[in-house]
Every structure is written in structure tokens, then in C-alpha cells.
Image (cartoon, grey):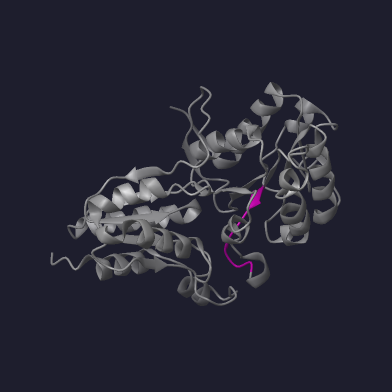
Amino acid sequence: MREIQFRDAVKEAMSEEMRRDERVFLMGEEVAEYNGAYKASKGMLDEFGSRRVIDTPISELGFSGIAVGAAMNGLRPIVEFMTWNFAILAADQIINCAAKMLQMSGGQYGAPMVFRGPNGPAGQLAATHSQSFESMYAHVPGLKVITPSNPADAKGLLKAAIRDDDPVLFMESEKMYGEKGEVPEDEVVIPIGVADVKREGTDVTIVSFGKIMKVALEAAAELKKEGVSAEVIDLRTIRPLDIDTIIKSLKKTNRLVVVEESWPVASISSEISHVVQRLAFDYLDAPVQRVTMADTPFAFAVPLIEESLPNVSRVVKAVKEVSYIEK
């Protein structure tokens, strides 16, 4: 199977859907003439023209509002943010308009659209450019939230997001755009709301998503050296959450560790911990452990960055704390 970069998987998904459906168009900062801030729309202006690949001013609230209006009137916009940190300015349109439009109009107007761009820490970008927003938006009824961890999932899930009749937030990562992975040449559309078991195991379940999946898988490999068999689940979709896959695994392993690069309060791991104790408490042999970003604004200094983010040693330590296994 061929290997392509994450950015190319994103471009293929958008291009294929624009060829399939003339209502789909792309708009955002530098998506056209510059081929995208991270080159995820390279060549699309040449193929689709300036009516369907549209450069916008640096005004997230303004162009997001235009996109919501376009979606209400039958088009299917893809809005690219240079970073989700900048999309804070567009939160009014995302939360108060796109998410609520179907309900507030009594079903007369929907907002079938995708908001996408890089999310989470990406090196020395400091506090205002290093935030993870998936839990904030997953809190809002009416929105779907997707965070892929590899090129194949990115393409398949983005195609599903573009076809979906609800507003979908598609959260990528600056650190993943250049990463390569196997992507089928045939069309694959991955259903929204279905997690993926990336590695099977028997002793403990590790749940994660997005680029931090790499840490979870590396930790599982280290644990194997010590005789601990870890099952690793990639959520892929944050809302709707595939709790059934988590509980099925928990019934086998009886232990759960959730890893995410967001702050701990009101996080995805908080929600998973609550739902698991409510629906599968009797299967837990130990309290759920969480490995998250430190509960502080993100630092610029490299030693502080390394200290605040989830890493392999922290995940291994958390697994050992829930395992009670003498090896």
C-alpha cells in the first residue's frame, strides 16, 4: 500500500469530495494562493478555481459567519483555521450559530460544514498558541468533534465529516502534517463515532486520541518488555464518543488509563472516567488513571514543556499504578 503524508491525506479527502459534490468549497487563511499554511490545500486553487478555494482576511469571526450562512443556504463549506487557537475568535459562530441552528430553526435550517485546522501544543509556541480545544467544543450539543492520529484515519474521517449534515470540528496537528502513513488508493469513508483498537492486549486498556496516540503506543511497547499486555484504543471521534468499545476492552482487562494532551479539569478523560464508573464499575479492579497536560498555561522553556506534557514514562507509571501486577 502507498504511503503519503498527513497533509496529502487531508488534501485528497477535500479534493475528492469537491469533485463529488459541487456544493463543497474551501475557505480560510492562505488556503488558495499560498497552498495552505501547512500546504494541506496545495494545487487545489489550480484545479477548482477561486470560487471554490477562497482566501479570506485574517478575521476568523467574519469568515466563519459567512460559512455558516452559506451552509444554511445549501452549500457545504470547509473552513480552515491556521490554528484552533485563532478560532477562539470564531467561537460565537461555531457555538451560537452552527451548533444551534437546526434546533433554533425547528429543523428548517441546518449547518452542514467542517471547521478544520491544527490543535494542541506543537513545540515552543508558548501559552496562547498551545491549547487543546477538543473538550471545550465536545461540551456543546449540536457539534461533532474528530481528532485523527494518522493519515489513513484523517482521510477517511474527513470525507465522512464533509458528507455529514451536522457541523463537524476536525482537529489536526502541526506536528503530524509531515508524517507518513499507509493510505488506501480506493475510497474509504470511516464512520464518525467509531473508535479503533490499534493494539490488542489483556492486562490494561490505554485510551487516547490525536497525535498523543504515538505516546500511548510507545508506552504499550515498553510495557510489553516488562510482561504487561496493554490494549490501546484510538478514540478518533471525541463526540460522539464510542464508549462501547472502551467498555468491551475494560471487561477484558479490568484496568483503564486515559491519555490526553489537554488540561485535566472538565476534560475528555474526565468524561470517560465518569461514564465508565457509571456503566462498568463492577469490571474495574482499580480506579481509572489519567495522564494529561499539567494544569497550568503552556510554557515556552523546553524543560517545562517536557515536564508538562504526557510522555512514555508517565503513561508506564500510570499503568503500573492500576495494574497491581508483580512481574
Q: Which residue is drawn at 85% across and 52% down?
A: 62
Q: Position of residue 211 (x, y in %)?
A: 49, 53
**Image-based side of 210 in relation to 163, left or right:** left
Q: Which residue is drawn at 19% across and 60% down?
A: 226
**Image-based side of 41 in relation to 265, left or right:** right
- Give above or below for 183 relative to 36: above
Q: Can residue 187 be seen in this view?
A: yes
Q: Quadrant of the N terminus?
A: top left
Nearest the eye: 233 or 193: 193
Look at the magenta stretch and give its main secondary structure: loop
Q: Position of residue 102 (x, y in %)?
A: 73, 43
**Image-based side of 117 in relation to 47, left or right:** left
> What span is colored magenta in the figure?
116-125
- Residue 117 colored magenta? yes
Q: Which residue is drawn at 58% across and 46% down?
A: 177
- Residue 303 colored magenta? no
